Image (spheres, rainbow, N blue to C red):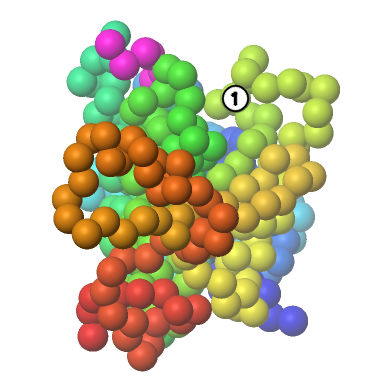
């Protein structure tokens, strides 16, 4: 079973927590891994190159292959440099796991523009920029696996995390579009929505529950495998519990003319009834190359 054996992977934010676990999982499966981590604090401050170096040493001690990278993926030059690290060390790139993240929590009315931008730049911009830098190589070789990291906060909201939640739902929109655009090139793009005990979640989760990052890395490893043909899926992993998240649309109601407020209110229960709901889709044509009935406006 090929899995990820012989493939080259980038894992961002791999110096600790979930990223470290993902890198170890991929390396154990035979992938050569670029362990990217700026070594910043939980809020994105500072830098420490030893974070990535320590994980590389751990992978090599176990017989795996890895190189460290401490570029800042929140900006275009750093994102391109991470991809260059893979190409220079291994001559190719097959897998991108976008995991890097920071937190700057505040209620929305107290949140500063700087707090908003800092979180968006790492989570959303960083995911887009690293993937964008990798994309031409994946297209040219007609193969790739991309994983983005969403969150329950992005999917369902969370008090005090407007910046984080917006970015984490933003990567889902990015995933949906890249799954369409990558389909004809055998590039599969999926998301994980993890609940795990890491430095990022310290003091926020029940430590009596088994929330080892390895549970999440099992999903990441599978989504990166050659045999996994899924695309545009969101896999939520909460400890030992794995589930699928989809955005669905109700059957809805037709009106003969633009309805009044009273008419909408009167029919809201019917509009909102999710009995027979279907997966939401853009109202455009299905191209021949789109897998799994995914819709796209692009020929």
Give the side of residue 240 with respect to residue 295, left or right. Answer: right
Residue extending farthest to the left is 258
**Taking 224 as reference, is 101 above or below it?**
above
Observer-nearest of 10 and 278: 278
Residue 108 counted in the magenta span? yes
Quarter placement of the C terminus = bottom left
Image-based side of 110 in relation to 47, left or right: left
Q: Is residue 143 visible?
A: no
The stretch of residues the image draws in magenta is: 104-109
Q: Position of residue 235 (x, y in %)?
A: 60, 54
Residue 119: quadrant of the picture: top left
Quarter of the image that includes the N terminus: bottom right
Most frequent secondary structure within the magenta stretch: loop
Q: Which residue is mark 1?
A: 201
278 horizontally vs 294: left or right? right
Q: Residue furthest top?
A: 110
């Amino acid at each position: 079973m090929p899995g990820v054996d012989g493939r080259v992977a980038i894992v961002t934010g791999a110096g600790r927590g979930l990223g470290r676990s993902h890198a170890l999982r991929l390396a154990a499966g035979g992938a050569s891994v670029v362990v990217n981590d700026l070594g910043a604090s939980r809020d994105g401050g500072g830098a420490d190159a030893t974070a990535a170096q320590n994980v590389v040493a751990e992978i090599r001690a176990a017989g795996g292959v890895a190189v460290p990278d401490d570029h800042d993926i929140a900006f275009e030059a750093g994102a391109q440099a991470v991809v260059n690290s893979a190409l220079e060390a291994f001559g190719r790139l097959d897998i991108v796991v976008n995991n890097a993240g920071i937190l700057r929590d505040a209620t929305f009315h107290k949140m500063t523009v700087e707090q908003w931008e800092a979180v968006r730049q790492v989570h959303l911009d960083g995911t887009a920029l690293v993937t964008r830098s990798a994309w031409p190589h994946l297209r040219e070789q007609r193969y790739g696996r991309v994983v983005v990291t969403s969150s329950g906060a992005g999917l369902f909201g969370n008090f005090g995390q407007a910046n984080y939640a917006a970015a984490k739902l933003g990567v889902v929109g990015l995933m949906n579009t890249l799954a369409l655009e990558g389909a004809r090139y055998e590039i599969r793009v999926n998301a994980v929505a993890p609940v795990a005990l890491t430095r990022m979640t310290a003091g926020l989760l029940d430590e009596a529950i088994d929330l080892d990052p390895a549970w999440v890395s099992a999903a990441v490893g599978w989504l990166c495998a050659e045999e996994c043909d899924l695309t545009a899926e969101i896999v939520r992993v909460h400890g030992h519990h794995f589930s699928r998240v989809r955005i669905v649309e109700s059957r809805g109601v037709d009106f003969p003319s633009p309805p009044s407020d009273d008419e909408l209110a009167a029919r809201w229960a019917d509009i909102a009834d999710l009995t027979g709901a279907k997966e939401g889709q853009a109202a455009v044509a299905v191209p021949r190359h789109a897998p799994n009935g995914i819709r796209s406006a692009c020929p």
